Image (cartoon, grey):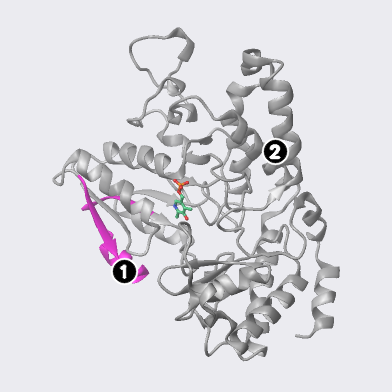
């Protein structure tokens, strides 16, 4: 792959124009959209309208006149289209962690007589912590976390003893993608309720929640959906569970008539029953605007570009003879790979800092992973070329060994 091929790929890229929808700093190659998506231009206009018109001038009337009250549903519907969910099953609210607590608790209530929640040992810590919190509330005899070290072990564990299977589709460290269809079907065959975390899937890979007959799912608004730092998350609950499920964070916004101010909780009939408190209108409005960037994007096309970018990056790294020092942790097979690449290196943290210094923003995951996210909406093939040139140079000159790159901030 040479410079000419790269230029050619950018010319043929049908998503190339989407880059203009984002504001990105000059001289920066942003390979961290898997942690915090870049800012869409529309975010500025929308935030400013919410502050300068809706809040300041229209004040409390805006709950009706600007549809603030419907925002969790409106945003949920926009996300639904990206994750293969029919209308009425996705709502935008709270954080991924809090939403996990709601669906985990609801699922445990559905599974009287079973007490085990099965997950992956390498799952994102917050997912495991939420189970631990629920276990301490319900007591060990009613709730227990079981961890499997890999996919084979996971499948072996699927039995009628398990209440809930809680998995993250794309591993946050390695970028490995689990087979949602197969694992959901295998779990259902044993009567297990299935919850998927789509934190690194939504807006990055094709997801078919309805077709896979998933029970519940959660995911982030600030990663590939570009909703901004701390943007609210989302929750999916399959229609078939709406009439019978209940969840313990039953705040007034999940009540069937919140403004009747009844003392007794009665849940809303649909997906709104998963709401808890008042929606954060400023941040949810920004996420709403950010999702409009996806309106004409075909997820298959997006996935193809994502894989083409990561393949291009890896191939260029090979051409620079870097694959001995940087060991690929992500599966080489594209169908098993999310929208990221992870490389192991003993000085991954320093490497990451040296890259950032030269305008290539990546991240580090303890203990030794250099992680790169490939966001097809705003990355070009030429960015792969430039980023690899810089990385290969840092590796060759051992620039990263300078003491300045060893200093750690509070967030890594
Ligand atoms: C990023 C991420 C989260 C984040 O959860 P928040 O509660 O939104 O901070 C949860 N789960 C996974 C798998 C993640 O990658």
Q: Left or right? Give the position of 114 relative to 290.
A: left
Quarter location, residue 42: top right
Q: Left or right? Give the position of 410 relative to 333.
A: left
Please name whichever residue, 240 or 94, is drawn nearer the observer in this view of the structure: 94
Q: Left or right? Give the position of 38 relative to 261.
A: right
Q: Which residue is at 43% across, 51% downward? A: 196
Q: Which residue is at 65% across, 37% downward? A: 286
Q: Which of the labelled discs sits on residue 149, or is there none?
A: 1
Q: Residues within 10 Å of mark 2 (few under 14, many from 20)?
A: many
Q: Mark 2 points at which residue?
A: 289
Q: In this view, does 55 lie above or below 356?
A: above
- Residue 79, x across and y down, in percent: 60, 42
Quarter of the figure that contains the N terminus: bottom right
In the image as oriented, which residue stretches furthest toward the left?
141
Quarter location, residue 289: top right
- Residue 156, x across and y down, in percent: 28, 66
Of circles 1 and 2, the one toward us is 2
Please name whichever residue, 144 or 113, is drawn nearer the observer in this view of the structure: 144
Q: Is residue 31 above or below residue 390?
A: above
Q: In this view, does 72 lie above or below 327?
A: above
Indicate the secondary structure of the residue bearing disc 1: loop
């Amino acid at each position: 792959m040479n410079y000419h091929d790269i230029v050619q790929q950018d010319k043929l890229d049908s998503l190339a124009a989407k880059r203009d929808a984002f504001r990105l700093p000059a001289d920066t190659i942003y390979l961290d959209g898997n942690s915090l998506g870049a800012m869409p231009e529309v975010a500025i206009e929308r935030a400013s309208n919410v502050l300068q018109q809706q809040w300041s001038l229209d004040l409390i009337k805006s709950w009706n006149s600007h549809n603030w009250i419907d925002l969790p549903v409106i945003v949920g519907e926009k996300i639904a289209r990206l994750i293969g969910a029919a209308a009425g099953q996705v709502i935008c609210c709270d954080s991924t962690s809090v939403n996990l607590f709601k669906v985990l608790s609801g699922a445990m209530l559905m599974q009287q007589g079973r007490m085990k929640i099965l997950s992956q040992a390498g799952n994102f810590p917050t997912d495991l912590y939420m189970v631990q919190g629920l276990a301490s509330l319900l007591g060990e005899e009613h709730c227990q976390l079981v961890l499997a070290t890999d996919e084979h072990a996971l499948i072996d564990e699927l039995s009628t003893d398990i209440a809930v299977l809680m998995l993250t589709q794309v591993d946050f460290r390695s970028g490995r993608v689990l087979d949602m269809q197969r694992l959901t079907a295998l779990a259902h065959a044993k009567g297990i309720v299935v919850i998927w975390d789509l934190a690194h899937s939504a807006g990055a890979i094709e997801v078919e929640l309805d077709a896979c007959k998933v029970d519940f799912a959660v995911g982030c608004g600030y990663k590939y959906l570009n909703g901004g730092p701390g943007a609210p998350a989302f929750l999916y609950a399959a229609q078939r569970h709406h009439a019978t499920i209940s969840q313990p964070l039953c705040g007034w916004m999940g009540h069937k008539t919140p403004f009747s101010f009844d003392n007794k909780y009665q849940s809303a009939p649909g997906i709104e029953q998963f709401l808890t408190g008042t929606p954060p209108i400023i941040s949810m409005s920004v996420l709403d605007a950010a999702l409009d960037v996806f309106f004409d994007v075909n997820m298959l096309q997006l996935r193809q570009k994502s894989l083409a970018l990561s393949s291009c990056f890896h191939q260029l790294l090979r051409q620079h003879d870097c694959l001995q020092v940087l060991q690929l942790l992500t599966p080489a097979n594209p169908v098993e790979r999310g929208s990221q690449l992870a490389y192991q290196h003993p000085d991954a943290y320093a490497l990451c800092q040296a890259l950032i210094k030269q305008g290539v923003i990546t991240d580090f995951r303890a203990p030794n992973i250099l992680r790169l996210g490939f966001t097809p909406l705003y990355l070009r093939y030429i960015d792969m070329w430039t980023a690899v040139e810089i990385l290969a140079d840092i590796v060759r000159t051992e620039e990263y060994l300078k003491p300045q790159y060893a200093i750690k901030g509070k967030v890594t």
